[in-house]
Image: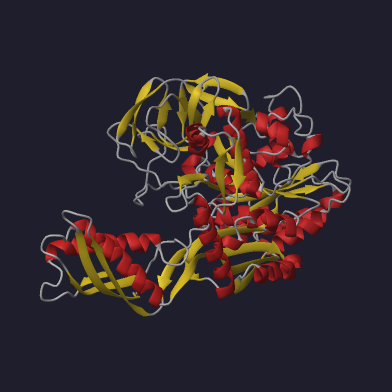
Amino acid sequence: MTQSPVTSTRNVVILGHTGSGKTSLIDAILFHAKQNDRLGLTANGTSMADWTEEERERKISIFAKPFHIRTTTKEGQTLDLTLLDTPGYLDLFGQAVAAARVADAALIAIDAVSGIQVGSIRAWRLCEALKLPCGIVITGLDKENARFDTVLTAIQQAWGRKCVPVELPTHNRQAIIDILAEGKVPDELAEEAEAAMGVLEEDAAEEDEALLEKYLSGEHLNHDELTAGLRVAVKLRHLVPVFETEALKGVGVSELLDEVSRLFPSPLDRELLDAGGKPVKVDPDAPFCGLVWRSVNDPFIGQLQFVRVFGGTLRADSEVLNMDKNQKERIGPLHLFNGKKDETVGVATAGHIVALAKLKATGTNHTLCAPGSDILLPPIQFPQPVMSVAVVPKTQGDDDKIGIGLHRVVEEDPTLHLERNTETHELILSGMGDIHLDIAVSRMRKRSNVDVDLQIPKVAYKETVTGRGEGHYKHKKQSGGRGQYGEVYLKVEARDAEDPEWFVNEVVGGAIPRNFIPAVEKGVLEGLHRGVLAGFPVINAKVRITDGTYHDVDSSEVAFKIAGSRAFSDGAVKARPVLLEPIMTMTITIPEQYMGDITGDLNHRRGRILGIDVNAGMQTITAEAPQAEIFRYAAELRSLTQGQGVFEASFARYDSVPAQIAQKIIASAVKHEHTDE
């Protein structure tokens, strides 16, 4: 790869709802740039973008992938373009988050028939959160029911008048007219083009005092002035240019690339700050810094780390420093991937994405920089999992294989979490939805050659006390020789969660010698862990040791530990114990027409609605619901909303379980305990 100036470099992520035409657009661009000798199609498995085995089987994008092309615009400008394809499926949004974090601009694909969907809104919000310059590309204008004007109006109503078309489709939809190009506009589009150009000229003028003065004096901006002003407007998110394509016909592809070159920022145009908020130089002569945004286990090359070069120059056969691990790494060849095609290059500069093989200590979200540098880049903020399953081996003895296999899958996807629940003793895999988890388990099965069952996880219930109770137990055992003796009196009461003192020794007069008090505390801890209702740990309880007796010969730590444990159980039963369950805070985004179904379903799940907000025609519901009721909510929400609903969930607190439900849980726990015995 010959070196091109950073000013010619563009790094663009393509975002949008599933089915919005992102992958088709990528394939059309790759075909146009002669990276592929035919137009790839997802439907028949020839897509250059969706090339992995999993993607071909499911016919959806699963992974974020970089593609690199070099082309020349109609104005003779070199365009050194890195495109990042992302999944539109909502379960796989973490891939889009990572790709957007390492891009300099975004294209949000919106289908000309379906219009704005939940995935479109999620993409828009992601760009807002990252302050990422973006444009909108309306796709599928060749479809029978496509309506450009209708979709454009919806876009402007949702996101404002700053969404302005810089291209217009002809009425027969056979061509896309670039109104910023220095060429004649067809008569049929003259009025629309003039209106759009008026808005664009005003937007450009507002970014520069000299241009504004010229514009206000009644003069028109020339082509170079207009382009310069609009580029600043796009960089500052004051303008969101709207493009159009008919990817399967190749219509609008070259015009889109021209506009990306003309309007989107280069890496030099964007301010780069380190994790401490300090500016970082990005020009090729600056110290190298880059961020690992994706890890892949390639069957032929091995572990690959995809790095976005943010500043300086990365060279093959060099040494870099992993700032997160404070460990040096030796860099071999730089791999430039286009689908399955792998090209090795010698250097990469700001804006480029290359893959590095066989790094020893580096993983996703690690910063690599030049030795002697201290640059640490802000990490990617991945979304939290919303759905969990318990992974159970079908064959005894496969636990270790399953754990190793899943760990490898989780290493490649930071939105997957794997843990052994210490309370329920289950291996819990958490992700963004049932499809996400199914893909992860399928990959583990293929790699490890083991099979598993997926079950709804057990709820980690807790117990607490709501009143006060006095407990007593005398442990006395004599069977010849030295016996066991320890007697404990105590009080159990509710404790404020902010009170750090849960165990208080109020014994006076040496009724229990001080050297036995730690043994009593250990016994009480055992009782807390064992619970008194259904075997769940007791929280927010305070225990006061008030009295007891001992024997000069027979008393021991073991005796007082047993007495403390049994005395606690006696007191806790009298202190009005209740069962607690984890309560989750949920944020649910749905189209308005499903509002009644969702609120009714939440009521059925013992949910409580806290608030409702409206954004771009979508309803966002904030609610609380018990964790036990939402383990399968990701799949059920998709069913209720025809795939258009999304939600996020986070732990809020523990709260009392309603009496009737608590009785069933306790009965089941007691029955299970007897069965195990």
Image side of residue 203 versus residue 359, left or right: right
The x, y position of residue 561, in whole percent, is 25, 60
Between 196 and 103, the one nearer to me in the picture: 103
Q: Which residue is drawn at 64% across and 31% down?
A: 76
The x, y position of residue 573, in whole percent, is 40, 73
Image side of residue 21 versus residue 188, left or right: left
Q: How many numbered discs, if any?
A: 0
Figure colour scheme? secondary structure
Let me know if residue 67 appears in the view.
Answer: no
The x, y position of residue 139, in whole percent, is 76, 45
- Give the farthest residue toward the front: 480
Q: In this view, does 130 lie above or below 538?
A: above
Q: Is residue 589 above or below residue 343?
A: below
Let me know if residue 670 appears in the view.
Answer: yes
Q: Which residue is drawn at 55% across and 56% down?
A: 128
Q: Residue at x 50, y 31 (%)?
A: 401
Image side of residue 174 versus residue 18, left or right: right
Between 221 and 185, the one nearer to me in the picture: 185
The x, y position of residue 659, in whole percent, is 55, 74
Image side of residue 110 versus residue 4, left or right: right
Q: Residue at x 46, y 26 (%)?
A: 356
